[in-house]
Amino acid sequence: MQSSIVSCICDSGRQVTDLESGEIICDNCGRVSLDKAMESRAEWRTFDSENNSRQRVGSPSSLAFHDMGLSTIIGKVNKDSAGHNLDASMNYRMQRLRTWDARTRVHAAGHRNLMRAFSELERLKDKLGLSDAIVQKAAYIYRKAQEKRLARGRSVSSILAAATYIACREMGAARTLRDLTEITNVKRKALSRSYRLLVLELDIKVPSMDLMKCIVKIANKAKLGERTQRTAMSTMNELINNEIPAGKDPMGLAATVLYLSCLTNGEATTQRDIAEAAGVTEVTIRTRFKDLKTKHCLSAMTMQEMLL
DNA sequence: TAAGATAAGAGGGACAT
DNA sequence: ATGTCAGTCTTATCTTA
């Protein structure tokens, strides 16, 4: 984590750059800044001082374009670069080239598919506040999926959402399946099916979600104090050392630990608030809470605090 | 009103058939 | 391929302090 002195739109927050996931996150309100999203966009510059007209100097190159942004289109005018008319044989050759140019450019069904997918990916990027790196990774995964014909019989949206989810996980950005389902019209069931399919077929090893990032995310959303957050993190470390988190829903566990540290720090909150921020139910928090108590997996001191 | 308890049901992994 | 089983999480409802 590296601090920078850019201010967020919220009053007091400074921003913290998360180098791993490439996101800029305000440590006060948890907002993901979209500043970086501009970087790879097309550059507009004015060289013409007379009329101030904007001239496009080139489109951005990105995996998230169906042709990687490098398309070159053969023009319609039968003139050479000096403006002279082409002779008949050259004319014929150009005509042939145009035909193939058009055939290969967009007519391939696969490319049309990619175009649709990537325009949707742009939408996801804005709504989720994803970094360019994540978008590129998602685009890469989607291409792979298409090459292996995994998208057949499945909606573009579900495969794309799954690819995006995987990209987030790989880059360490804390996004849940639920986050994806909320901003796409993909049903949870379809999304998790696509997700597992991609992981299986593409041999992707998805790192487990970073529990610390889960804590930060929930704490920001539920507006919990810095102190509570730190307590939760140290408790979580303790759990990790005892291999407690294995097989448990990370968001549920993180929510429970946060609730616990609210109690020990005397911060006023309810199970409901935290559960809502974490996207789990209160019942989940309770059962995790009970697990922790019965398994005696916490240090004596933490246990004591819990019983108070 | 917040928190605890309980039950029913969904979805998926492991394993056997 | 199909069925079963244990384990997890969610939703709903009732009870308790």
Image (cartoon, coloured by chain):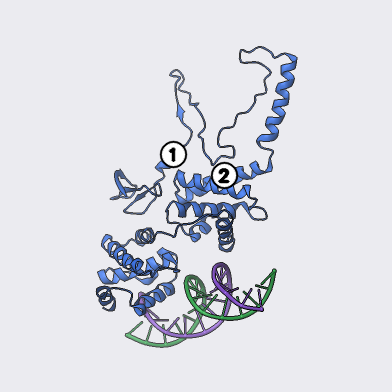
Chain colours: A blue, B purple, C green
Residue A212: percent from left, percent from top: 36, 60
Q: Establish if A51 lies above or below A194.
A: above
Which quadrant of the rendered structure holds the C terminus of chain A? bottom left
Q: Is residue A63 visible?
A: yes
Q: Establish if A103 lies above or below A274.
A: above
Please tell me how crowded label 2 is: few (under 14), some (14-19), or many (20+) other residues with Cα within 10 Å. many
Q: How many marks?
A: 2
Residue A237: percent from left, percent from top: 32, 64
Q: Establish if A169 lies above or below A251.
A: above
Q: Establish if A218 lies above or below A106.
A: below
Given the image, on which type of amino acid does mark 1 rest?
A: Met
Residue A79: percent from left, percent from top: 66, 16
Residue at 51 percent of width and 58 percent of height? A182
- Residue that numbered label 1 is attached to: A38
Q: Quadrant of residue A192?
A: bottom right
Residue at 66 percent of width and 11 percent of height? A84
Given the image, on which type of amino acid does mark 2 rest?
A: Phe
Q: Quadrant of residue A105?
A: top right
Residue at 52 percent of width and 45 percent of height? A122
Q: Which one is earlier in the sequence, the residue at label 1 or at label 2?
A: 1
Q: Chain of mark 2?
A: A
Marking on residue A136: none
Q: Is residue A273 visible?
A: no
- Residue that numbered label 2 is attached to: A118
Please tell me how crowded label 1 is: few (under 14), some (14-19), or many (20+) other residues with Cα within 10 Å. few
Residue at 40 percent of width and 42 percent of height? A35
* Residue A185 located left or right of residue A19: right
Between A54 and A64, which is closer to the camera in this rendering? A64
